[in-house]
């Protein structure tokens, strides 16, 4: 899985491309562990090309969410494929994480 | 219809496992969300066997067997390693709010498996651990 990043003044966008599993989750974790992430007001996760997520991938987001929230950094997912969103739903994470349909809504969040 | 796959216990083989399950199921033109759920359940069990039961020892192997009859999918994952690995709970109910508060990274895999599959069983056969999963497909 590839993770590419785009930045603006107050927003970091992570673009996920591929399958997020126990093998590739370390790549995402490394991005979210960077200390400068707390300097942004929002971290947007573009899921358009994220074709799969396992508990390892969910665990990376869960493990960082509280730290981001404590620093007033919003984590917002957008463009999520139905089959990936379904995995969040199974664990009830769709009501605990901020997931919106479009990038426009994510930017406005 | 049946199919079999043997993999070494490396997390780099998880992609091969998912492609194997996907290929077996999508031949029947099934709903993508349901196919993904089954792929996920198998991935979670296999990952547990690889990482926790076998310490990612690539000298150890897992055998996966898929069988589709009418609308029921039966799956067996047999650990060819010597360590018996029976999860403490096959249907845990994690408190996700608490997990977020604690910043927990793991412990959700079996909850996903239990919520996706109709039956989840772990047992010992010939000194090996076997995981049996079953799901009725629409």
Image: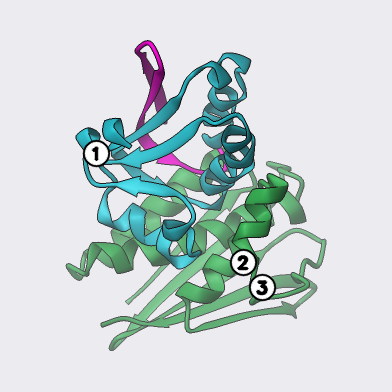
Chain colours: A cyan, B green
Are dots 1 and 2 on a single chain?
A: no
Which residue has dot 2 on it?
Answer: B110
Please provide percent x and percent y for residue B123.
71, 80
Are dots 3 and 2 on a single chain?
A: yes
Please provide percent x and percent y for residue B132.
57, 78
Mark linked to residue A105: 1
Extreme-left residue of the structure: B29
Residue at x 17%, y 67% (from the top left corner): B29
In reply to whether residue A70 is colored magenta, the answer given is: no
How far apart, in angstroms, are the residues tagged by discs 1 and 2?
A: 33 Å
Secondary structure mostly taken by the magenta-highlighted segment of the chain: strand
Q: Chain of mark 1?
A: A
Q: Which residues are magenta?
A: A1-23
Q: Is residue B27 or residue A2 the one in the foreground?
A: A2
Q: Chain of mark 2?
A: B
| Structural crowding at the residue carrying mark 3, measured as other residues with C-alpha within 10 Å and reported as few (<14), some (14–19) or many (≥20) | some
Assign the N terminus of chain A to one quadrant of the image: top left
Which residue has dot 3 on it?
Answer: B92
Q: Secondary structure at mark 3?
A: loop
Q: Mark 3 and 2 residues: CB-CB less than 8 Å, in contact? A: yes
Indicate which label's residue lies in the foreground, 3 or 1.
1
């Amino acid at each position: 899985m590839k993770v590419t990043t785009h930045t603006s003044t107050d927003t970091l966008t992570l673009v996920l491309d591929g399958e997020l599993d126990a093998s590739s989750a370390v790549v995402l974790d490394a991005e979210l562990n960077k200390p400068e992430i707390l300097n942004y007001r929002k971290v947007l996760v573009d899921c358009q090309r994220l074709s799969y997520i396992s508990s390892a991938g969910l665990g990376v987001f869960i493990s960082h969410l509280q730290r981001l929230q404590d620093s007033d950094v919003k984590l917002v997912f957008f463009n999520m494929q139905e089959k990936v969103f379904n995995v969040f739903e199974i664990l009830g994470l769709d009501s605990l994480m901020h997931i919106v349909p479009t990038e426009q809504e994510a930017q406005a969040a | 219809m049946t199919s079999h796959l043997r993999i070494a216990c490396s997390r780099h083989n998880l992609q091969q496992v998912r492609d194997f399950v996907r290929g077996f199921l999508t031949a029947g033109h099934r709903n993508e969300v349901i196919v993904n759920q089954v792929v996920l359940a198998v991935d979670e069990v296999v990952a547990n066997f690889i990482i926790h039961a076998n310490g990612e020892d690539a000298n150890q192997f897992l055998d996966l067997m898929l069988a589709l009859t009418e609308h029921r999918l039966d799956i067996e994952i047999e650990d060819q390693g010597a360590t018996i690995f029976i999860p403490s709970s096959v249907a845990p109910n994690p408190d996700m709010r608490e997990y977020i508060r604690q910043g927990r990274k793991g412990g959700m895999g079996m909850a996903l498996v239990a919520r996706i599959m109709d039956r989840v069983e772990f047992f010992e056969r010939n000194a090996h651990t076997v995981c049996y999963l079953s799901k009725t497909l629409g």
